[in-house]
Amino acid sequence: MFASSVSVPVVSLVVPLAAPAVAVPVTAPHLPAVPSAAPVSAAGGVGHGRVVSADPVDTTPHVLDGIVNALALVGGTVVVGGSFTGVREAGGSATFRHRNLFAYDLATGRVLPGFAPQPDRPVQALAAGVHGTVHAGGRFTSAGGRWARGLVLLRLSDGSAVARFGAPVRGGTVTSLVRSGRALYAGGDFTAVGDVPRTALARLDAVTGVADPAFTVEPAAPRGGRTRVHALALSRTRLAVAGDFGTLGGRSRPQLALVDVTASPAAVAPWRTDAYRGRCRSDFPGYLRGLDFSPGGDHLAVVTTGGPMGPRTMCDTAARFETGAAGPVRPTWVNHTGGDSLYAVAATGAAVYVGGHQRWLDNPRGRDSAGPGAVARPGIGAIHPRTGRALTWNPTRDPGIGVKAFLAHRGGLLVGSDTTRLGHEYHARVGMFPLPITPDS
């Protein structure tokens, strides 16, 4: 499926057999301004001029059990979703019995006691809403005091569900959410939203939850038994979609595609890559897990699981793709863990942060081992956005299942996972690396 990989020191470049087009960055037209409450993952994310500190802040609260799957920032409030039952403030002794969802003040770490929607099952996705609200997606059937199957809009003021928003998800789960203005994009393995058939991908009105009839881009031809969207990212005019599918909108797009969301109707973009046409271990039929646009939208960072299959595959890797070409597009660089999964990625311009349960980066020749040139980056690491090599930033994290969520914001990088040690300190399942303060900041 792939030609022999070309190795530059510690980074392997994987070249598909198909002849690639030359990737020439272009400037895309801008969408109308996104409201300030939009999630930082939308519209290309927040750019950083430097790498965050390796010393986490001391104020983040502790999630006492389970796992954190998702983070959102609404103004100065951090919303945390996952599968857990208890939360404690840093330095505090009281336990807040917040099930699967809670919020805290970004500056102080104070838990918002009035925000306790108590979804009955895990939360897997979050996106900031407008006017002090947050969208939550997952496997739950109730939240905020109302029946809410898989998707709900909640008020931060009191945790109640917004009754006007009606978008029950049928036949599956919501695993990814991104919002821009009144457009809310949802991905997962569902088969309908309300009474409208939608397979794994939908665009909804962010205020009412009504499925957009003009958005009918459908993933299909999964490698496993079910079509799934694992991750979404939004930048300017395009939506990036990653998951277990072979086609999107009837066009060959193995596991990764871009959608022109400003077209009427929305349409699959000419951009494409065959990089993920290859197979990993049989228990990972679809192996893409996370993706993020650079702040300017000129490139896309993608991370995968898949097993230790060697440097000629894209299994257990981080990769950069230029987004200006029509395709087929090769990865600009590929960084291999040597057999450990990556689940989350954040591209800030200064670094591409990756998280999972990896032991190493720069490890194309490792197979559950440290190959020549490998560098230890347990549980979390940062890659140079241009060279594709691991940066010296190495705070460390207990691996566990892995990092499931990053959220870059103007003050730093938030991290959600399932373990309690981050940066050699106790930070249970939630932590934040601040941007260093410099004299000219």
Image (spheres, helix red, strand yellow):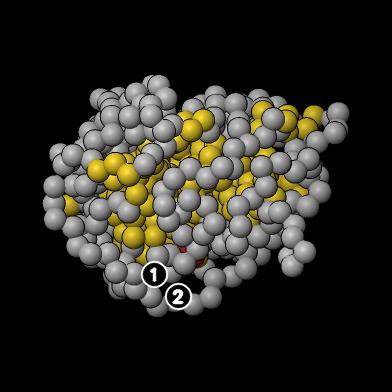
Mark 1: which secondary structure? loop
Res 440 → quadrant? bottom right
Q: Is residue 97 visible?
A: yes
Q: Residue 384 location in percent, x, y?
A: 48, 51
Residue type of the residue flagged with mark 2: Leu
The answer to whether marks 2 and 1 mark residues whose Cβ atoms lie closer than 8 Å is yes
Q: Is residue 215 visible?
A: no
Q: Residue furthest top?
A: 368
Q: Residue 9 location in percent, x, y?
A: 36, 41
Q: Residue 99 location in percent, x, y?
A: 66, 33
Q: 99 or 91, which is in the foreground?
A: 91
Could you tell me which residue is drawn at 45 percent across and 54 percent down?
Answer: 385
C-alpha separation, residue under disc 2 versus residue under disc 1: 6 Å
Q: Circle 1 sits on which residue? A: 237
Could you tell me which residue is drawn at 51 percent across and 59 percent down?
Answer: 349
Could you tell me which residue is drawn at 68 percent across and 54 percent down?
Answer: 435
Q: Is residue 203 above or below residue 189?
A: below
Q: Circle 2 sits on which residue? A: 31
Q: Is residue 26 above or below residue 420?
A: below
Mark 2: which secondary structure? loop
Residue type of the residue flagged with mark 1: Thr
Could you tell me which residue is drawn at 28 percent across and 27 percent down?
Answer: 309
Residue neighbourhood size for the residue with mark 1, other residues' Cα within 10 Å, grouped as few (<14), some (14–19), many (≥20): some
In the image, taking residue 267 as reference, residue 251 lies left or right, namely left
Q: Pick whichever of labels 2 and 1 is earlier in the sequence.
A: 2
In the image, taking residue 191 as reference, residue 358 lies left or right, namely right
Q: 83 or 353, which is in the foreground?
A: 353
